């Protein structure tokens, strides 16, 4: 069963089932696990009849707030299209082979992983990437372009709320893509026209050390 936001329903998206994603990851094998977060685990996979490697973000629905995070991310991503945002391929809301709820979001796979892992791979420092000055500036500009688009170039402003190195993903040419919109906020109207009360009405969310002032 495919679950799409209204914006995504107008797009020609790949239709997938739980079985498709199960097979694509060899049963969600630990050998295909590429990352874990508060609400989800991310697996690398290969879908039959699809020529690109994919990343499958599987929500841990036993974690409080995970289902809400899934809906928020689908809703936010359905409104956006930019070269510096992680591209969504499809969403899946179904049941697994045990009859339990299953929710996942499928993205394009970023071959160079997250900026955090490239800079601070404590498990294997030999894999840490030495970025030169130009590459660092390019990555910073890519993230800035993504945020400028989210704040000023779409009808409904999107506030990411959790910009940090682990949410900046790099493709094979080191172009940065901002991802993980699980706690993103949608604000009606342009940012400058939003009331202060509207912007500040929610509790502070994000990661300590990266939450904006």
Image: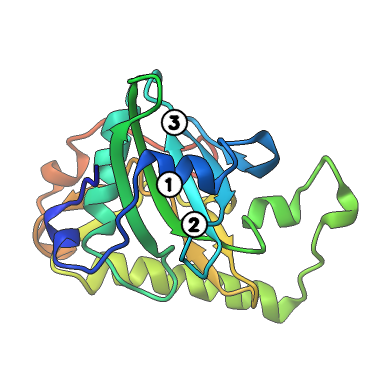
Q: Quadrant where the C terminus lies? A: top left
Left or right for 120, reference 174: right
> In percent of the image, x 47 and y 66: which residue is there?
50
In the image, is residue 177 above or below residue 70?
below
Q: Position of residue 141 (x, y in %)?
A: 52, 75
Sequence-first tag of 2 and 3: 3
Q: Is residue 110 left or right of residue 134?
A: left
Toward which corner of the image does residue 21 lie, by quadrant? Answer: top left
Residue placed furthest toward the bottom: 134
Q: Residues within 10 Å of mark 1 (few under 14, many from 20)?
A: some
For disc 3, the marked residue is 39
Give me the C-alpha separation between circle 2 and circle 3: 23 Å
Check disc 3 and report its element: helix, strand or loop: loop
Q: Based on the displayed image, in which of its 4 quarters is residue 127 positioned?
A: bottom right
Seen from the viewer's position, the closer of residues 5 and 146 is: 5
Residue at image mark 2: 47
Q: Nearer the viewer, mark 2 or mark 3?
A: 2
Q: How far from the left and from the top, in percent, is residue 162?
A: 43, 46
Q: Which mark is residue 109?
A: none
Q: Which mark is residue 20?
A: 1
When asked about the image quadrant of residue 43, the answer is top right
How many marks the image carries: the answer is 3
The colour scheme of the drawn protein is: rainbow
Is 102 left or right of 200, judged from the image as shown? right
| C-beta proximity under 8 Å, tags 1 and 2 | yes
Q: Kindly check if marks 3 and 1 are in contact, taking CB atoms under 8 A apart as contact.
A: no
Q: Secondary structure at mark 1?
A: helix
- Residue 181: x %, y % from top left: 36, 49
Tell which tag, 3 or 1, sits nearer the viewer.
Answer: 1
The quadrant the N terminus occupies is top left
- Camera-nearest residue between 164 and 35: 35
């Amino acid at each position: 069963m495919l679950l799409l936001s209204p914006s995504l329903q107008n797009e020609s998206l790949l239709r997938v089932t739980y079985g498709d994603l199960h097979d694509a990851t060899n049963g969600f094998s630990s050998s295909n696990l590429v990352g874990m977060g508060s609400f989800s685990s991310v697996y690398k996979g290969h879908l039959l009849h699809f020529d690109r490697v994919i990343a499958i973000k599987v929500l841990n629905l036993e974690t409080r707030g995970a289902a809400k995070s899934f809906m928020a991310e689908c809703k936010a991503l359905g409104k956006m299209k930019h070269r510096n945002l992680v591209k969504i391929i499809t969403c899946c809301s179904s049941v697994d082979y045990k009859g339990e709820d299953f929710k996942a979001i499928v993205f394009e796979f970023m071959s160079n992983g997250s900026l955090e892992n490239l800079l601070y791979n404590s498990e294997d420092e030999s894999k840490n990437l030495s970025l030169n000055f130009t590459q660092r500036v390019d990555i910073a500009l890519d993230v800035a372009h993504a945020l400028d688009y989210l704040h000023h170039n779409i009808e409904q402003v999107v506030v990411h709320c959790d910009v940090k190195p682990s949410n900046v993903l790099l493709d094979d040419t080191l172009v940065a893509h901002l991802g993980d919109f699980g706690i993103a906020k949608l604000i009606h109207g342009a940012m400058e026209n939003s009331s202060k009360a509207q912007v500040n009405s929610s509790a502070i969310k994000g990661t300590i050390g990266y939450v904006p002032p």
